[in-house]
Image: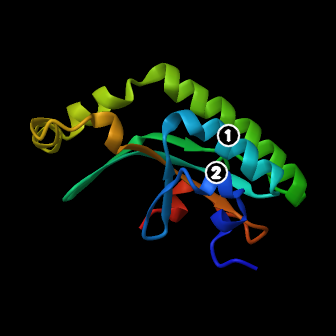
Amino acid sequence: MHDRPEMLLPKTIRSIASRNDSEWGWRPDAIPQVVDAAEQAGLLNIGGQLQFRMPGATCECYWVEVDAVAQEPRGLRWTERVARAATVARQQFADIGNRYDFLSEGRDAFPAAFQAYEASASNLGDCLWFIWYVEADRPRPTSVRAYLG
C-alpha cells in the first residue's frame, strides 16, 4: 500500500501534477480527468482549492473550493461514497469555473505578489494550480478543511 493515495492514480495523471510537501495540484483544465481517474482507482475525491505557486510565495484562494464530502450522508458503502463524491466534485468544479475568473481572484486577493510575478515577465498561468485531495478507503473525512494545515 502507498503512503499517499495520489500514488494510486495513473502515472499519466501523476506526471502532470505539481507537488508541494503533501499537496498535489493540477492545472484547472486537468481536474475533470483527475476526478475521473480517482473514481476509477476507487479513491474518494475530497475536493480542493485554487492556489498560485510563485517563487517565494504561495497564494491560496481558499474560498474558491470544491468540498465533495461536506454534505455526504452517513451509511454509504465505500463504492457509493466514491461514486457520489466524484459526481459532486464534477458539479462543484464546473460551478466554480462558471462563477470565478481564477486569475482575477488571485490578482485581487494578492496584488503585491501578482505584480512582482508579472513584473518578471512571467506568465500567471504558469503558477495557477488547483490543489486536489483524494483518499483511499479510510475513516470518513468531514470536509476538505480536514486536509488543510
Identify the amino acid type marked 1.
Answer: Gln
Q: What residue lies at 65% left-to-right and 79% top-to-bottom?
A: 3
Helix, strand or loop for disc 2: helix
Residue at the (80%, 56%) spot, across then down: 41
Question: For the residue carrying disc 1, how many other residues have a C-alpha within 10 Å: few (<14), some (14-19), or many (20+)?
Answer: some
Is any part of residue 143 visible from this angle? no
Residue 88 in picture, x, y percent from top left: 70, 37
Mark 2: few/some/many CA within 10 Å (<14, 14-19, 20+): some
Compared to residue 104, the image places residue 64 above or below, namely below
> Mark on residue 13?
2
Number of on-image labels: 2
Give whichever of 76, 120 is nearer the camera.
120
User: Is 138 positioned to the left or the right of 127 in the image?
Assistant: right
Identify the mark nearer the N-term, 1 or 2: 2
Name the foreground residue: 129 vs 81.
Answer: 129
Residue drawn 51% across the image and 28% down it: 96
Q: Amino acid at mark 2?
A: Ile
Can residue 119 be seen in the rendering of this structure? yes
Residue 84 relative to residue 61: left or right: right
Q: Position of residue 46 (x, y in %)?
A: 64, 53
Q: Nearer the viewer, residue 12 or 9?
A: 12
Q: Quadrant of residue 124?
A: top left
Q: Which residue is mark 1?
A: 33
Q: Are marks 1 and 2 in contact (CB under 8 Å)?
A: yes
What residue do we see at 41% from left, 68% from top? 149
